[in-house]
Image: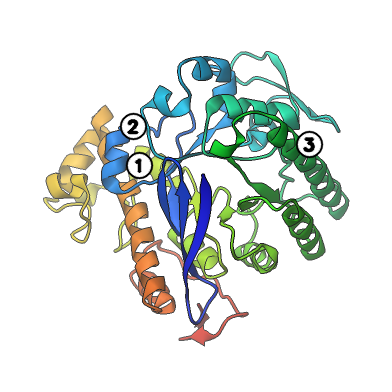
Amino acid sequence: MFKFQLIKKDAKTGARRGRILTSRGTIETPVFMPVGTQATVKSILPEELVDIGAEIILANTFHLYLRPGDDVIRNLGGLHKFMHWDRPILTDSGGFQVFSLSDLNRIMEDGVEFKSPVDGSPHFFTPEKVIQIQRNLGSDIIMPLDECPPPEASRSYAENSAELTLRWLERCVKEFKESAEQSEQALFGIAQGGFFPDLRDMSAKRTIEYNLPGYSIGGLSVGEDKRKTRDMLEISCSILPEDRPRYLMGVGTPEDFIMAVERGVDMFDCVLPTRNARNGTLLTNEGTIRIRNAEYRNDPNPVSETCGCYTCRNYSRAYLRHLYYAKEILSSHLNTIHNLYFMCDFMRGLRRAIEEDRFREFAISQYENSVTGRILTSLPKHPEIGGQSL
């Protein structure tokens, strides 16, 4: 079962409040998906993810195929049972990792040849194989094989890449329809096109011809200027259908969420909160805290007075700093609880703001509170408030 309900649209922007219904649970959107690359969200228990409000997580096809193997996971009852998580799981296609992590890869019409970063063994991903792997994993939302062009890609490269992604999508859809038990999984399409407006337009229009239950926007937030991200998002979201969820892959920060939600994006994932947690960087409504700084050595306060997470209810900044310098495992654990709670709570506030027709006010308040410590990117295609578009 997979169904998207559009509950509310913000009166002044493209922001939307939705709900995804799956056989394993309901996902309230806009939503942030914690990343569980290796069938685990690093340093946190599944029960703790439930406590902080995570309704869906992301796992990685590439890594699970290499280790322990999708056949192992299938024989042990599927990914949900394997990792003790009974809520929805989204798996990416593994395409990005093939191109970014492999020492050697070769892209061909039939697929991509690569060497494992684990042991150097040779492998070959075809569109059909990527679907078969995700069938074995048993995730709820699956992705087709695509090529994510580098940010500096020429127009010729981006065009060829977008066309190849579309041809691979056709093969993925065919394999998906011909394989068994398709009713329990939803296959999304991925729109590419680099940073060329006409290619973004073409890719989105041809992707939606497959009438899939949801659509992803790929190849953004890969180091480009935020204005380029904004422009490509506006093109894609103006084409992708309103009655299907829109997933912006690999993004990001509260600043990114606001910019993308304003344009109609519903789903996000990023390793930032868990990676930052392990590095001692904590996200708060008052700004970013680097717990290793000397100023917190004797600080009895919680990370944030406005946070309701387990870490903030029970531990001081001084203790968290001590754990970090002592290199205790508990440091990563408590910091991760806080950062993921912050992200989920940010989304809860964002959803309430859309429901109450105050999305722009919510966005302005976040930047006034320096939630990311960065200045909001100018968004001139929307009405301005206080000199900045929201």
Task: Tell me which amino acid carries mark 3.
Answer: Arg
Q: Is residue 373 visible?
A: yes
Label annotation for residue 277: 1
237 and 101: which is toward the camera? 237
x and y, in percent, of residue 56 in the image: 43, 44
Residue at the right extreme of this rendering = 156
Task: Tell me which amino acid carries mark 2.
Answer: Ser
The residue that disc 3 covers is 171
Discs 3/1, front: 3
* Label 1 secondary element: helix
Q: Residue at x 14, y 49 (%)?
A: 313
Task: Tell me which amino acid carries mark 1.
Answer: Ala
* Label 3 secondary element: helix
The residue that disc 2 covers is 43
Discs 2/3, front: 3
Discs 1/2, front: 2
